Every structure is written in structure tokens, then in C-alpha cells.
Image (tube, grey):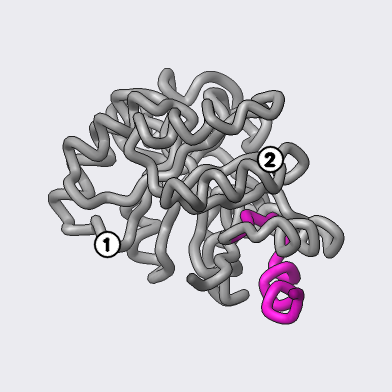
Amino acid sequence: MTFLTIGHRGVMGVEPENTLRSYLRAERSGMDAIALDLRLSKDGVLVAVHDPEVDRTTDGSGAVADLTLAELRGLDAGQGERVPVFEEVLEAVRSPLQVSVSDGAAATALAELLLRRDLVSRVEIASADGALLAEAARRVPGVRTTLFVEPTGGDTEAVVDRARAAGAATVALDIHHIALELVEAAHAAGLRVTGLAVDTLDRLRLARALGLDGVTTDFPEIRSTGRFTA
């Protein structure tokens, strides 16, 4: 399989994260996929924001769930960019998308959209919540899913079991907490393994040495370097 390079919230190391500007640059940089985060606005629209609140990434404040789409669109998300609606992202870029959701309401809205627009082949669902992924897979037959896994203290079997229970095709972990034993066990179980965030040449070399299937990165340079790093 091809070694994948996934743009983290676009290429958030050089552009405002989770903005159309960032996604477009990730696509121009040749990223194999773009990772983004979705939450529901107060009036039920899927918008691209990572944190539960807008304080860190915009000039506004408050919880995403307490703000209407109009209020969110009035905020500056960096360099004059606005908080994107997910359907805007679908129109702006043609790259495959890895979409992260953290709550059931957003996951349900995403599942309905994928079915309505026949996006199963283009959009992958990612989450740290295995039950949420399992439910998404039930709602959207054939959708690919990735399970985000926190450091486990070396409990390889537990990671593999969690991924299987969730029906995930891929497990994604912090590059600093991935052991070769885990990669081998996951591969033996038919799972792919990706590392994040791989933002330096040393981390990229580590990812290659571990036999990872791909990396998530904040920087476009990792894409071009990755093609030549064995």
C-alpha cells in the first residue's frame, strides 16, 4: 500500500487551521488526504472547528454549540478567513477527507450528509470514540473509519481489540508512543497504522522505520520529503 501523507487541519503549521486557505494549500502541496474537524453550530450546521470553543482559533469567544452559523461566520479564523461550513470544504477541494467528530450529534449529521451526497468513497470518519465509529459504520455501510488511540503503556492487544470492536480500518497514534510491536500486531490483524504529528525529518524517518502506513503532518514540506525517505 502507498505511504500516505495527511494534511493536519489543512497544513496548520503554515496556514490558519481548519480554514479553506489551509485546505487549499494542503491540496496544492499534494497531500494524499486532508484531515479536518467538525462540530455542530447552535442551528445544526456542520462547521470546521477543532476545539469545543472558538477562543483559540478565532477572534471570538464561546462554545461552538452556543453560536449560530451567522455568528460563527462573523469571526476571523486567521488572516481574514472565516469558519468554513463542511459543504463549502467539499466544493473547494477535491482531495480525500479524513473527518474527525467527537460527539454523536455531529456524527449523525455527518452520516446523513455522506449518504445524501454519496460521499462514502471520498470521506473517512475518524474519532477517539470507538462506539461512535461503530455506529457511524452501521449508518453508512462501507465507510472507512480511523480510531484515534491515546498512549496505552504498551498494551498492544488492547489497541487491536478496541480497533476491531469499533470496526476501524486504521489506528492513529502519537508518533512518540508507537512501538514496532504494535505496528506488527495491527498489521497482522489487518489494520493500518498512522502516526501524528510528524513535523520533522527525524519523525518521518521514525515513521518509515516503524513501517507505518502513513503520517499526519502540519507542514507541506513533509509531503515532498516523504517521497524520498526510506
Residue at coordinates 53% horizontally, 24% vertically from top-left? 52
Closer to the chain start, of discs 1 and 2, is: 1
Residue 156, by quadrant, is top right
Residue at the farthest bottom position: 228
Depth check: give the residue in front, 173 or 188.
188
Q: Identify the mark at residue 134; answer none if there is no mark.
A: none
Q: Secondary structure at mark 2?
A: strand
**Image-based side of 37 in relation to 167, left or right:** right
* Highlighted range, magenta: 214-230
Residue assigned mark 2: 174
Residue at coordinates 31% horizontally, 36% vertically from top-left? 45
Residue at coordinates 43% horizontally, 35% vertically from top-left? 163
What's the amino acid at mark 2?
Asp
**Image-based side of 169 in relation to 149, left or right:** left
Residue assigned mark 1: 121
Alpha carbons under labels 1 and 2: distance apart: 26 Å
